[in-house]
Structure formats: C-alpha cells, structure tokens
Image: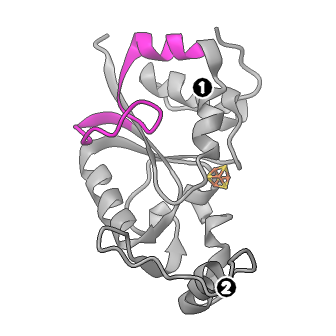
Amino acid sequence: MPKKKLATIWLGGCSGCHMSLLDIDERILDVVKLADIVKSPVVDGKELPDVDIALVEGSITSDEHHREILHIRKKAKTLIAFGDCAVMTNVTGMRNYFNLEEVVNTSYLNAVSNDGQGEMPSHPCLLKLNDKVVPLQEVVKVDFVIPGCPPDADTIFYVLFEFLNDRLPDLSKAKKLKYG
Ligand code: SF4
C-alpha cells in the first residue's frame, strides 16, 4: 500500500489536542510507516499540499481561520475535526456568551493584569476576530470527529491507524483494542 499524506493543523484551540497527539509516544513509528506527516505545528509551517487526512484542532474564530478551513477542505480527502473545540467550539466558544467588543476590552484594555491602561493589538498582520466562534462543520463538511478535551492518545492513535489502513474507525471500539 503506498504511503499516505497526513497533516495536522491548529486553528482556534489551545494546542492541548496536539499535546495529546504527542502522547501516542512510540506508536508514532507505526504512523510514519504508513504516512508522511507533511504539515504539522509539531513539525513545521509548510504550505498545505494535497493530503489524504487532515486532523484539524480548534474552532473557527477569525477571518484567517475561515480562509484556512476552506483551503484545508479543498486539499484534504478526509477532514477530521480533532477535539471538542473543533467539534462544538467548547472552551474557545465561551466568548460567544458576550459581545466581541466586551471580550477584547476585557482581555486587552481592562485586564486586571495590566499595569495601567492596556493596549489593543493593531498590527495589520493580525487576524480579525469574528463576532462568534463556530465549529468546523458550520463552514465545511467534516468527515469524522474525534471528541474529547483533549481526546486521549489511544483514541487518536486508533482513529489514525484505521484511516491509514483504509478502514472506517468505530469509536465504540477505540478503548477496547490494543495496538503496538
Ligand atoms: S478541545 Fe480542549 S485540549 Fe483541544 S484545543 Fe480545545 S480546549 Fe484545548
């Protein structure tokens, strides 16, 4: 079987899902026998090529995330929502209970940690926050979800291993199977 191409991408999340991915430990060797990891925040920041599988952590919080997930959808045969922020906004979506101005003022201008008046970041390179945070499936078609905050390493490995062997994972079996 030819090697597949795998990407892992970090949008509006805390990186905890990627930390959990690293917890698959030596089983990464089983993954790289079957796939080349062509883009990942734990590898480098290359442009996203066409890939067989994209694991996407985090929700859509900004103009940049919106553009990025549309691009990922075009490039990935299988797009997996990776963790609860990607699936249902979770922690990232807690700001949806407030209006955006209130949120950024609290975070930057009036934060109790500020020594005096805070400043609003304004560099043109910075992304522009959307009014509301949304999960991936509100913008693109998602092919599979890995729930959890973060998902546990055994489940992540199970899902990856199944897709890399051209099988559809059954999450109800994830914890019962032993790999490696
Ligand atoms: S699902 Fe949890 S661990 Fe993953 S990015 Fe969101 S808050 Fe972090």
Residue in the picture at 60% in, 28% down? 22
Name above or below for residue 163 compared with residue 151. above
Horizontal and vertical percent for residue 63? 35, 72
* Element marked by disc 2: loop
The answer to whether residue 50 is magenta is yes
Q: Earlier in the sequence, mark 2 or mark 1?
A: 2
**The residue stretch that appears in magenta:** 27-53
Q: Identify the residue at image location x=46%, y=63%.
A: 137
Q: Nearer the viewer, residue 128 or 70?
A: 128
Mark 2 against mark 1, which lies toward the viewer?
Answer: 2
Which sits in the foreground, 174 or 150?
A: 150
Residue type for callout 2: Gly
- Does the image show residue 170? no
Marking on residue 76: none
The quarter of the rendered structure image containing the C terminus is top right
Task: Kindly identify which numbered label has been placed on residue 157.
Answer: 1
Dot 2 beta carbon under 8 Å from ligand 1:
no
Residue 50 in view in this figure:
yes
Image quarter hosting the N terminus = top left
Q: Position of residue 85 (x, y in %)?
A: 60, 58
Asked if residue 8 lies in the magenta stretch, the reply is: no
Q: Which residue is mark 2?
A: 116
Q: Position of residue 40 (x, y in %)?
A: 41, 36
Badge 2 density bin: few <14, some 14–19, many ≥20, Cα 10 Å? few
